[in-house]
Image (cartoon, rainbow, N blue to C red):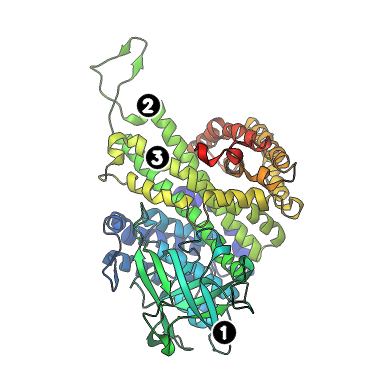
Amino acid sequence: MRQTLDFLLFDWLRAGDLTTRERFAEHSAETFAAVLDTCERIAREKFAPFNRLADTEEPRFDGERVHLPQATHEATQAYAESGMLAAAQDYDVGGMQLPCVIEMAGNAFFSKASVAMGGYAMLTSGNANLIMAHGTPLQREVFARNEFAGRWFGTMCLSEPQAGSSLSDVATRAELEDEADPLGPRYRLTGHKMWISAGEHEITENIVHLVLAKIPGPDGRPVPGTKGISLFIVPKKLVDERAELTGERNDVVLAGLNHKLGYRGTTNCLLNFGEGRFTPLGRKGAVGYLVGRPGDGLRCMFHMMNEARIGVGLGAVMLGYAGYEASLEYAKQRPQGRPMTAAGKDAASPQRPIIEHADVRRMLLAQKSYVEGGLALELYCARLVDELHTGDDAAGAQALLDVLIPIAKSWPSEWCLEANSLAIQVLGGYGYTRDFPVEQYWRDQRLNMIHEGTHGIQALDLLGRKVVQQGGASLAALAARVQQTIERAIHTDWAPQAHQLAAALAQVGGATKKAWSTGEPEEALANATPYLQAFGHTVLAWLWLDVALSVQGEGDFAQGKRAAARYFFAYELPRIDAWLAVVARREPLCREIRAEWL
């Protein structure tokens, strides 16, 4: 993996050029490599050996506290000590001012080694980044800085038992207690939050929850819809202005743990806020400090959610990568079958490794195209984040990110799950036993189509908002980038693929127009998920063509990249015809079928 990662970073994305920018001027190719080396070493020594342990000894609640394997404590501590929690932050807050693309590449090693054990850090970094963007100076100093230092970890609390993805139905209530509290306007929260990853543990001395809740209107009732949602910092244990624990426990408690198919090493919790088990500052109700303005909670939270979606996409890629490498190694060693000749099989001849069978190579090549293409996608998005913050065309980078974020989260979640399924298939009967790791990779992976916005929600976001916003500006920005790659490829050996990609791009554009031709959202969006699949495959075909144009030489590494690119165009891109057909004709079946028929 490291050779591919270095190639994508430095030969394809030219990450080394970022050192010419003022923010990254103290860095060099050597410092970037040192960061990657450190992450790779910690992941190899502290995370990978305990991935199975975190799965089999899943979090346990004894009614008072949550128990985790000691290895989880040690791994997360090693991660915090590496400085990666604050990798992209300013030097003056303890950060390294790394480019986002290098930070993302470093985190890839942890996701591959143990995606569940790495979940605590991903959530903490996103939580602290949000506070840095939207919090007050004191909130940044007290909460974000201590999260970056690894002293406290963080969460995001959105869903509720009755309101999963439908955030407008959030019922958690926040009532003002003290407008002048130094840590921010202080509220009392009551309600319940469900599916909260890392919501309870004792890895760190405190947990900083970011909680969506509604402030009652003048009539005492919560404001309906998303406009009434505000965001609050709710620490597990109360702290003062000097970031010292006051000794009081906040009124937020664990009601129970959810027992998941995979990702078991990360606690997943039902949390009760304000039930009265604790009485901070002398009364019941969870103490929370307003972040930003009242009613601005969802906009603030999306800062963390978008970052988390790229993180989920990266985690999906690396789970796929782990399965690919395991099945590749197995296929090289497992003898089975003999060559078929015109005269049939010679039973006396030695068996050959299964990697010599064309169908096994098909499955391995499919995995390679999914995981290496997915890695290119996530790193490309991270490179756009660097352009957004330090480049000359922030508007262009934002337009591209807007349309690519749903793909960055959803495409690897679906197709690297397929990679994990193929890894099991390569191992045959051994694949679904616990003696080999590929069954765990599949179980961990299956959650990613639900994490941070389900597959269907990403599809609605893409077709319902992103490709039509501002008169289709984001779609046009992407099409322009794709066209640049096509023009570079048209006079090379990749000309057939360039023509194929141009036709696919035109298909996507045509289907988009036809989907919205009646102006009826219900008609346009009924087939949003097939649209998402076709759009994602077109994006990945573009990236594979762009990557292939950067490949040099005739060695095994180069030939492997070219083969994966050719595979994607030969076997994968043709799938979009069927997906876009139902979009273009606004196929009504799924919208009109009666519930009684199902």
Upstream in sequence: badge 2 or badge 1: 1
Circle 3 residue: 421
- Asked if the residues shown at circle 2 and circle 3 are in contact, with their CB atoms under 8 angstroms apart, the answer is no
Instruction: Look at 36% across and 53% down and name the residue there.
Output: 262
Q: Quick check: 507 above or below 245?
A: above
**Crowding at mark 1 (Cα within 10 Å: few <14, some 14-19, many 20+):** some
Residue 434, can we see it? yes
Circle 1 residue: 185
Q: Amino acid at mark 2?
A: His
Circle 2 residue: 357
Q: Amino acid at mark 1?
A: Pro
Residue 99, can we see it? no
Looking at the image, the residue that sits furthest to the front is: 596
Side of 229 relative to 239 (left or right): right
Q: CA distance from mark 1 to mark 3?
A: 50 Å
- Label 2 vs label 3, nearer the camera: 3
- Label 1 vs label 3, nearer the camera: 1
Residue 379 at x, y percent in the picture: 54, 53
- Label 2 vs label 1, nearer the camera: 1
